Amino acid sequence: MLILKNAQQFSHEMILSVNLEDGIFIDATAGNGHDTLFLAQHIEKGSKILAFDIQEQAILQTRHLLQNNDLEEKVTCILDSHAQISNYLDEKDFVRLAIFNLGYLPKTDKSVVTRASSTLEAIQILLDRLEKKGKIIIVSYYGHDGGLDEKNSVEGLISTLPQKEWSVLKYQFINQINCPPICYVIEKK
């Protein structure tokens, strides 16, 4: 029996759909560390994870979660904007998968949010550095100030990607109230 998943559960299914061995994986918005932990629990030998966040509290929480699960050696936590991803990759590096959770860090200052400008810059970098069959997963929590603009900017960019080169999916419940999260999946053909 197939049970419909929420956006976060669906994003984790998409993570598991890629080859998790010998690749570079990016959590572009580490937040509380849940996606970073999920990646660390599932990647195989030869893989590495880079986890980005602009908030020191998020990086500390992510490190703490990884340490509590004995997985900190699999992840490099980076206190920097996801718009700076290319500064942490070698020229020859390609990314197998990247995941974003757009919005704010739960249970903290809701005025510190992801922004369309840096998110679009990061997505563009990743589009240029994505492996064939690689994926970019974006979960948009857009029910905050500026969230709808960011969601619309992201959707505007990815909806114009050439069909011959990219598959782009939008996964969303349409009968839920309060801006239910949307999961976008971009796959390089």
Image: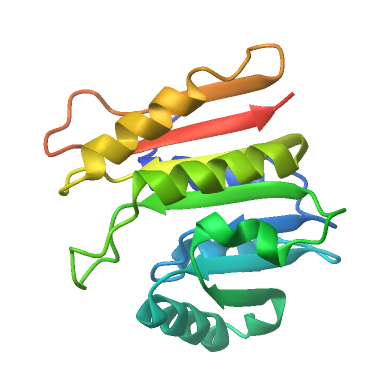
Q: Which residue is drawn at 64% across and 44% down?
A: 126
Q: In screen coordinates, is 23 left or right of 124?
A: right
Q: In screen coordinates, is 85 left or right of 20?
A: left
Instruction: Give percent across and percent down for residue 24.
Output: 75, 57
Image quarter of the C terminus: top right
Q: Which residue is drawn at 53% across and 55% down?
A: 83
Q: In screen coordinates, is 22 left or right of 48?
A: right
Q: Is residue 65 visible?
A: yes
Instruction: Give percent across and percent down for residue 1.
Output: 46, 29
| Quarter-of-image position of residue 154 | top left
Most distant residue in the top direction: 164
Q: Can residue 181 be seen in this view?
A: no
* Relative vertical location of residue 75 with respect to residue 166 in this rendering, above or below: below
Query: Total label count?
Result: 0
Along the viewing direction, whichever of 83 and 175 lies nearer the viewer: 83
Instruction: Give percent across and percent down for residue 35.
Output: 50, 61
| Quarter-of-image position of residue 176 | top left
Along the viewing direction, whichever of 68 and 150 lies nearer the viewer: 150
* Relative vertical location of residue 169 with respect to residue 162 in this rendering, above or below: below
